[in-house]
Amino acid sequence: MSGRLIDDAMWLAGLILIGTILCFLLTPIAVTVVMAFDSRAYLGPLPPPSLSLRWFQQFFSDDYFLRGLSTSLKLATLAVAISTAVGLATAFVVERAEFAGKQLLISLFLSPLLVPPVVTGFALLLFLSHLGLINGFARLLCGHIIITVPYTIRATLTGLGGIDRALTEAALSLGANEQAAFWDITLPLARTSIISGAIFAFAVSMDDVAVSIMLTDATTYTLPVALISSMRANFDLSIAAASVMLMLVTLGLIVALEKSVGLNKAIGQGVFRS
Amino acid sequence: MTAMQDPAEPVVVFRNVSKRFGSTAAVDAMSFTVAAGETLSLLGPSGCGKTTTLRLVAGFEQPDAGTIEIAGQAMTGRRPYERNVGLLFQHYALFPHMTVAENIGYGLKHRRWPKAEVGDRIAEMLRLVRLEGFDARKPNQLSGGQQQRVALARVLATKPKLVLLDEPLSALDAKLREELGLELKQILSTVGSTTIVVTHDQDEAMSLADRIIVMNRGRIEQLGTPGEIYAQPRTEFVASFIGRTNWFSGSGGTRLVNGVCRLMTDNGTALNVKTIDIPPAGGWRVCVRPERIAIMPPHTATTDPDVNVLTGEVVSIVNMGAQLHFVCRTSEGRITIIQPNRQGSHSKTGEAVSLQFGADDCVLLAPDAQ
Amino acid sequence: MTQARGSILLLLPSGGLFLGLFFLPMAGLFVESFRLYVPGNIGSSANAPFTIANYQELLTPSFAGFLFETLRISLLASLAGLLLSFPLAYWIVRKVSPRWRAIAVGLFVTLMFLSVLVRTYALELSFGAAGPFRPLLLSLGVSTNGRGYIETLVGAGLLHYIIPVATLTLLGTIQNVDPRLIDAAQALGAPGWRAHLGITLPLCMRGILAAFLFAFTFSISAFVIPMILGKGRVLFISNLIYNRFSEIADYPSGAAISIVLFFVALSIVYLTSAQVTKRWGA
């Protein structure tokens, strides 16, 4: 076959492929959104005969889910606040330092990303039990901190790395000492990376199941854990309503990311790099 | 503007300063002084240590040996913000998140300039660099030339004892370079500042500096005015690095009367060189600048016995607009001659010519150690 | 020097955090995996003797089967993910106007941020046993309760996360390849597809491998996706660990499996990184 024919054939195949992929990615989402408004009390075939908000009402009146939601929000906010502060301090020191084991130290700080979350949760459970820490919220907080810190460190490191060293030196030569240079120059210029790291960490915390499920107890649990138990026990459409709510949360985070940082910049700054 | 300094005292004193990185000496026992109000250039190829020297003066590096004094005070252990030295970075390093006014005011803020006077000083600086009305702009709204002027204003605002320029014109295109070079020189002399310019570009050095230090491998090859460096290079390196050169090599020679030596090149040509030095025993090099050689019609006689004559053939002519560059093939290899382009008739490619230059157009040098 | 002291002060909180919340717990897990478990207890008792029984137990065919299944499905999903993401990323970078590109990026970032629960629920709802596609699948002769279908569904669940992430990663990689290289190749006589095979692909290798590595480690560590979509019939290692923990309270065994999973993940990362560095430079 001539080269040109193959080119054209591949172009067509590519188009079909991309269409299929997009369908695959978006159809389940669309189905969920539609079914969340289904008026029937059972799981019936598409399309729903009429629409209603009954499942949303059920979700919002269910104490079980609401408690989970409140705990998730509290945990995420606290964990992200702590992780961002710790991440900033760590990244700042590491970025400036020049010594032989620097890469190794960075890998060490990012190592929790390599460990399967179930393992992290399990190890933490055993350790904290040994120490006698039985408060559910405290244990969950520990878990959420350790899974979010690598993301804030990585995002901040990338942001700091993108700042031209000459800018800091210019500040020093103009009379600012190291602290002043940090607050005047480094921090404002790294602001966008720090924020995108924090937003990403928030999403990770809100979404976590594996670590939370190991550290949860009867009275303290996160929303994802509640939803999973619900899914295994009773696969009904109140979870569809919950899913739509979670999609709105995700959209909210994306809008926050776009407004504060700009999506293209966030990607360029390696927040998502593995 | 008053002069910055008591004219008698040097502003910078380097005494045997050395700096090593690993096993290499970036700066090797350098000593020099910079007088008040003068512009000194550190000129050399990349890796010669000029940037390291600059950073030592600014305080971003500490010397391993030797002392550095600025305005009579020893600088050992002093951080950059504890010295009143202004540094103009190669790519300006303007703070992108601050306005022009905030950039210029940054040094004023941190060197504790009285708050009431800050605004006036910023305005004064903007007038000096001819950027009135630009105070609210951000760096990314400025052209390259404008950014450079803001960077200069920022540096001069705090009346530093010493101004350091790191390749100030390298980021600009050729036309702008000339224009801004002149402006830079004017502003610096108006302010009366003492300046050190670091550059690898000899045009930059020659046009900006009162004196030039040519550096190579961490050491001073030669210190002198632009004219001295060009016409009287003291080493092979300096002769090669600055401007264009024609080289002759050989060994041995005899002294004649009236300060002229008669040297025999390896190719058997006799050269008359005016010099007070004795030709080095192990071999010598002679440098002749291209604009010192005259192209004559072949067989042109000369009555002066000290004139050197070479016969050759024109191989190529390049018209550079203001100059004509000739390359001729001779018994001594290829010789380059540069003439002003007077738009008259001149020798053509392939023609035989006679190349003539005087004994005092030659500089006798020892070959550099390899 | 005060600068060094200040640095150490700043590192103390994170150092303490990592020590207390990660390194020490992992060490503890390692120790626990060597302790003897007496059925009926919760975890090992305080002075339980050391044994390698927990690990010996894992040498059985059934555990190897779980490990193999996890690795197999993960590998297939990762390969499929890369195969699909690369053309997608290429199309977005080269063939789409800047406005649509921004929309595509926004879409993929949103998909990436989407909760894993939403994803798995959505897939189960759409493609599961009670879903709207069931009649269509039955007519094609596919049973939604068949093992093959469930494995595929788990793979699809993994892909639903892998494709957005890999595409976003590859966007950067492909943008770094100068399109004029392909022009040059075509001017020299190579048809488009050969130019891409010989030029674009090799230049993107490092990004492709990084994306593959990420997809693979994500997949083998997956928990929710196999838990919901696997219906108890397809179990990944993470699920096995959770079962040991929640159903039997055999912590030492769970610990042993955890350590094995950890080392498998670590080995994959280092081996692949070493290969990448060897063949394509640091």
Image (tube, coloured by chain):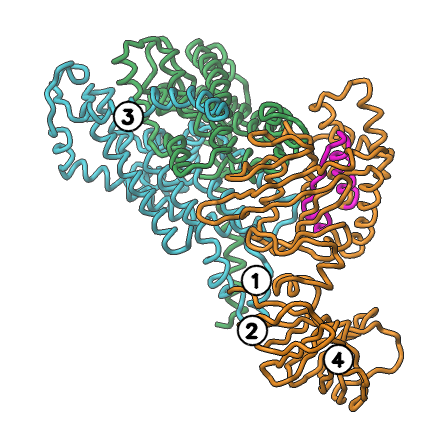
> Mark 2: which secondary structure?
loop
Q: Say the numbered circle drawn on residue B325.
A: none
Question: What residue did someone put label 3 on?
Answer: C26
* Mark closer to the observer (1, 2): 2
> B21 or B287: which is nearer to us?
B287
Labels 1 & 4 near each other (Cβ < 8 A): no
Q: Distance between the residues labelled 2 and 4?
A: 22 Å
Question: What residue did someone put label 4 on?
Answer: B306
Find residue A259 and report its horizontal and vertical position in percent: 64, 29
Q: Does the magenta stretch include residue B92?
A: no
Question: What residue did someone put label 1 on?
Answer: C181
> For the magenta stretch, what is the residue range?
B145-171
> B369 or C247: which is nearer to us?
B369
Q: Which chain is tinted green?
A: A
Labels 1 & 2 near each other (Cβ < 8 A): no
* Mark closer to the observer (3, 1): 3
* Mark closer to the observer (2, 3): 2
Q: How crowded is mark 3: few (under 14 residues within 10 Å), some or many (20 or more)?
A: many
Pointers 2 and 4 within a single chain: yes
